[in-house]
Image: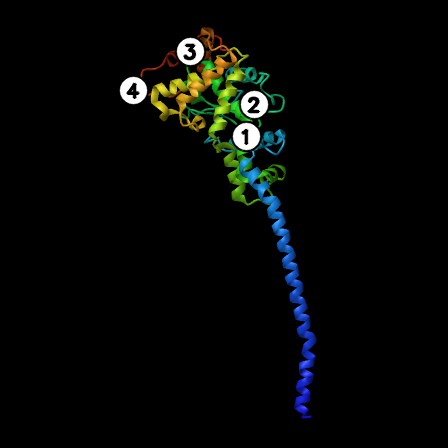
Amino acid sequence: MDPSEHRNLNYEGNNRPERSGIFRLLHMLRSFFYSIRKIILVVLAIGLPIFIYFGFIAEDPVFEPQYDVEIGRQSVMSIEQDPDEYPLLSPEDYPEAYDYIRNMVKEIAASPEVQYADLFKYDSVQIIHRDDVLNAFCTPGGYVYVYTGLIHYLDHPDDLAGVLGHEIAHAELRHSAIRLQKEYGRERILEFLLVGGVGLPGLIQAKILKDMLTLNYSRDQESDADAYSVRYLKDTRYACNGAAAFFDKLIVEDGDASIPEFLSSHPDSGARVRDINAEATRIGCDTSYEEVDTAKWKAFKALLPAPEVDEDQPPTEEQNGEPDTDPET
């Protein structure tokens, strides 16, 4: 045999184990990726429906109500760090005004319909000095904020009680928690609350903080809050359909164009008035206004910083002078 042929045979023979090893490795890799694919399919089959349910369908939060308080606490910190947007009146400077509005909230929260009165922070009402804003809101966990613009706009305490009942209902029914859960998922919200968002991108943390104050409610959530505001006011001194009177004034003065953003998710405000009044009729609660409360209301408004006067408009009764009536409720 030619020596060169002998060398070639040895060369090919030496290659066989190497090529065999490569084939075994490729086979192992193929089996591994096939197993991984099966695991991924199983995870998707189980996890995707759960994600879709909790992210887009579930109408109940999957975390406990005490986490709502922590969400609210984060919102409070965000508000306090932005005094230009949220200039808060100091309770030390306006003690009588705060006594009045806190007593109102306390009376509403005493309703047997309110489940979380002992857990949520309804007693920590804050007044925001913005006469240009017709608004009020309640964060998750029951931190209530009311703008002076809304207070000066309303004609009667029952109207404010109706608005506050509506906002408390959003907290009680945990509407913000549900919206945040659908927007970000349970794990991200809990991570944000429990470890301060460590591991979450900064933009997501900032967006969660912003959305805690600005997420809009659905039409059904707004309708539920309207109905519960009536129930909460049933056992109070206030007309249980106070929220309807507020809507009536807005509609009469400027139609739906003047409905503030925090109450505007429902497209037909007239229907909301009818629904609120229908709920009041259904449960048989008092819808009458007390004149003595009207006088105390004027005294309460006089305790706040006077609103800026439009030079083209005559001053209102409150701007001409302070009523003598004691505003305590």
What residue did someone put label 4 on?
Answer: 312
Q: Tell me the CA gap for discs 4 and 3.
A: 22 Å
Residue at the spot x=54%, y=36% of the render?
A: 57
Q: How far apart are the two marked residues, 4 and 2, measured between alpha carbons? A: 38 Å
The front one of 325 and 329 is 329
Q: Amino acid at mark 1?
A: Val
Q: Residue at image x 68%, y 68%?
A: 24
The amino acid type, in three-letter code, at marker 2 is Ser
Q: Which mark is residue 322?
A: 3
* 251 left or right of 278 in image: left
Q: Earlier in the sequence, mark 4 or mark 2?
A: 2
Tell me the residue that label 1 is attached to.
76
Instruction: Note whether 196 is above or below 278 in the view shown.
Output: below
Q: Are marks 2 and 1 in contact (CB under 8 Å)?
A: yes
Find the distance from the CA under tag 2 to the CA under tag 3: 27 Å
Closer to the chain start, of discs 2 and 1, is: 1
Image-based side of 272 in relation to 38, left or right = left
Residue occupying the point 56% across, 30% down: 72
For label 3, the SS is loop
Q: Between tags 2 and 3, which lies in front?
A: 2
